[in-house]
Image (cartoon, rainbow, N blue to C red):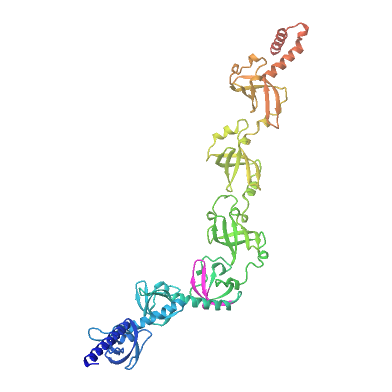
């Protein structure tokens, strides 16, 4: 081979080797490679990456939260190769990018395996914080910092601690982590161990952590238990703050443990004697005592008779006279009242109390002071279709029935003469204490005309004064009495032609014959027709009959003449 050929072949081999070298070197760009620190100048480290070139890396890239590396000449480090050569002929390398690349690979494996990763919170951003995961930067939302919201995360900054990766997107370079899930998991494990060591009925000390409307949460050394307001004391507790305060150490009894939910119910009153034991012996039915009103409802009022013991005064047992009034208008909260024990149920833990039983029954008092027949006075409180109600002393009412308004006139007519507010006198007819009813009478003030008139016999002739002339007959009053009655049209004359009411006038007096008198039923009926028929029969018997040849006119004429002579 000639020298020229040999030189040409050498050039071609060199070119091929150079091209291969460039290709190989270009393939290294964008990867992590190893290098050696050959010098340290001020704040920069000079690193030989083995490609017949060196690169510079800021010393601060080798330090940071949780990785204070003391770099020195001769150390081997991994760096990220951006470009083999820049305009200055140096390799463009980065320690941060190398660490980030390594971290992403590790983090992806941890994310797939749901493993915890270590990191450091190093900065505050909008909505949360940034976390250094050994070179990779992740976002920690504010809601994922702790189990409970915390105001100051300063003590957590720069402290290596575990996190759980919630989401990763390598293409966008996004990582979202949570510290809260790690705490919850740790807490759940601790809770399980602690719950397993507790037993129902155990007495333990705890610290009050939080107070709500319905109770207080007590820290039992890593797990919270609920001390419900109803389990704080045997007495009524309106708010938990009346019994406990935040930070207070309290001795509690474990009432119930739910192994599945790890919920623990606590009690304080269970450590004290039950005041309901022997309650029936302490408060026999009928006992009177003082109590304090603790609560008022629509159906009654609760009264504390001793600490931890409350009884109910039902609205029906509050007043003898106020039936449809809200309990709040009779008693008030914190008021001291006299009550009577009506019923005690130790099993159901109930006591029925009475307020009105400590006062005399107003109907009994009225019956003693106003026996039947006595006269009382009262104001017309109400008018109904069946009578008048009068307000009487003792805040009770009495009723005058329609039938007791007037002896002679219908009650429906008489009641129209009265109105609310009128003051009336009435006679006490009857007092029913059990049914709480008082019957009064207005007509009884003037006496009973049937009693005053004496006895009337059937067939007796009476004189009647016409009060009113009606189409159907005559309203009349028996002379000398207050009794009134009605003579029907058919009873005003013997002859049908004469049975005309218009023949009579008001104020005129007529004789009539009694055809019915029932003192018990208070009825009297009279008839002009019956009197005429009776007189005719008497005349026929005295002066002859039609069989003797005398005409009826002759007989009546003779009777009339005899009557005229007798009168003279």
At which x and y percent is residue 136?
37, 79
Residue projecting furthest to the front: 1
The reply to whether residue 65 is in sight is: yes
Residue 521 vs residue 151, the one in the foreground: 151
Q: Position of residue 266 (x, y in %)?
A: 56, 72
Q: Give the side of residue 50 with respect to residue 255, left or right.
A: left
Reply above or below: 289 against 56.
above
Which of these two is toward me, 275 or 34? 34
- Residue 467, quarter of the rendered image: top right
- Left/right placement of residue 116 relative to residue 276 reads left
Q: Magenta region: which residues?
A: 203-224
Q: Residue furthest left?
A: 4
Say if 467 sits above or below 127 in the image.
above
Residue 120 visible, this orientation: no
Quadrant where the image shows the C terminus: top right
**Considering depth in this image, is 267 or 499 the residue closer to the camera?**
267
Residue at far right of view: 548
Give percent across and percent down for residue 60.
31, 85
Q: Count how many numbered circles sit on residues in the image.
A: 0
Q: Does the magenta stretch mainly form a helix, a strand or a loop?
A: strand
Q: Is the residue 319 above or below the residue 530 in the image?
A: below
**Residue shown at 61% from the left, 54% from the top:** 317
Please state which of residues 72 and 9 is positioned toward the viewer in this rendering: 9
Who's the residue at 60% across and 76% down the image?
A: 199
Q: Which corner quadrant of the image does residue 20 belong to?
A: bottom left
Is 78 colored magenta in this rendering? no
Which quarter of the image is occupied by the N terminus?
A: bottom left
- The quadrant in which residue 110 appears is bottom left
């Amino acid at each position: 081979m000639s020298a020229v050929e040999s030189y040409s072949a050498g050039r071609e081999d060199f070119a091929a080797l150079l091209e291969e070298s460039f290709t190989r070197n270009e393939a290294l760009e964008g990867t992590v490679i190893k290098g050696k620190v050959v010098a340290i100048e001020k704040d920069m480290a000079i690193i030989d990456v083995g490609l017949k070139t060196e690169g510079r890396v800021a010393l601060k890239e080798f330090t940071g939260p949780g990785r204070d590396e003391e770099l020195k000449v001769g150390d081997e480090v991994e760096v990220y190769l951006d470009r083999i050569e820049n305009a200055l002929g140096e390799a463009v390398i980065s320690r941060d990018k190398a660490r980030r690349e390594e971290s992403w690979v590790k983090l992806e494996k941890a994310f797939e395996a749901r493993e915890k990763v270590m990191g450091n919170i190093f900065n505050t951003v909008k909505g949360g914080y940034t976390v250094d995961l050994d070179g990779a930067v992740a976002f920690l939302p504010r809601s994922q910092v702790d189990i409970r919201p915390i105001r100051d995360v300063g003590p957590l900054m720069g402290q290596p601690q575990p996190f759980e990766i919630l989401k990763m997107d390598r293409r966008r370079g996004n990582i979202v982590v949570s510290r809260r899930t790690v705490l919850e998991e740790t807490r759940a494990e601790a809770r399980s161990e602690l719950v397993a060591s507790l037993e129902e009925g155990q007495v333990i000390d705890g610290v009050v952590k939080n107070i709500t409307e319905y109770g207080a949460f007590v820290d039992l050394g890593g797990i919270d238990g609920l001390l419900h307001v109803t389990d704080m004391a045997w007495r009524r507790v309106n708010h938990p703050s009346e019994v406990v305060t935040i930070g207070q150490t309290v001795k509690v009894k474990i009432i119930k443990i739910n192994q599945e939910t790890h919920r623990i119910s606590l009690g304080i009153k269970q450590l004290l004697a039950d005041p309901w034991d022997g309650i029936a012996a302490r408060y026999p039915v009928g006992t009177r005592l003082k109590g304090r009103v603790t609560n008022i409802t629509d159906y009654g009022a609760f009264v504390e008779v001793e600490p931890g013991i409350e009884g109910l005064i039902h609205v029906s047992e509050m007043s003898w006279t106020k039936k449809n009034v809200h309990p709040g208008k009779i008693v008030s909260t914190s008021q001291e009242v006299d009550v009577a024990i009506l019923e005690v149920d130790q099993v159901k833990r109930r006591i029925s109390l009475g307020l009105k039983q400590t006062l005399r029954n107003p109907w009994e008092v009225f019956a003693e002071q106003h026996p039947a027949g006595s006269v009382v006075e009262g104001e017309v409180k109400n008018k109904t279709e069946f009578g008048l109600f009068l307000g009487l002393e003792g805040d009770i009412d009495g009723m005058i029935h329609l039938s007791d308004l007037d002896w002679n006139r219908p009650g429906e007519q008489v009641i129209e003469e009265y109105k609310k507010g009128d003051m009336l006198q009435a006679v006490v007819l009857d007092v029913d204490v059990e049914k709480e009813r008082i019957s009064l009478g207005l007509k009884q003030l003037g006496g009973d005309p049937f009693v005053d008139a004496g006895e009337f016999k059937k067939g007796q002739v009476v004189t009647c004064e016409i009060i009113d002339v009606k189409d159907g007959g005559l309203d009349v009053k028996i002379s000398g009495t207050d009794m009134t009655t009605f003579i029907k049209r058919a009873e005003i004359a013997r002859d049908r032609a004469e049975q005309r009411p218009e023949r009579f006038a008001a104020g005129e007096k007529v004789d009539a014959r009694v055809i019915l008198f029932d003192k018990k039923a208070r009825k009297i009926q009279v008839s002009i027709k019956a009197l005429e028929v009776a007189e005719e029969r008497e005349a026929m018997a005295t002066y002859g009959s039609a069989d003797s040849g005398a005409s009826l006119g002759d007989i009546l004429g003779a009777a009339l003449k005899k009557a005229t002579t007798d009168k003279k």
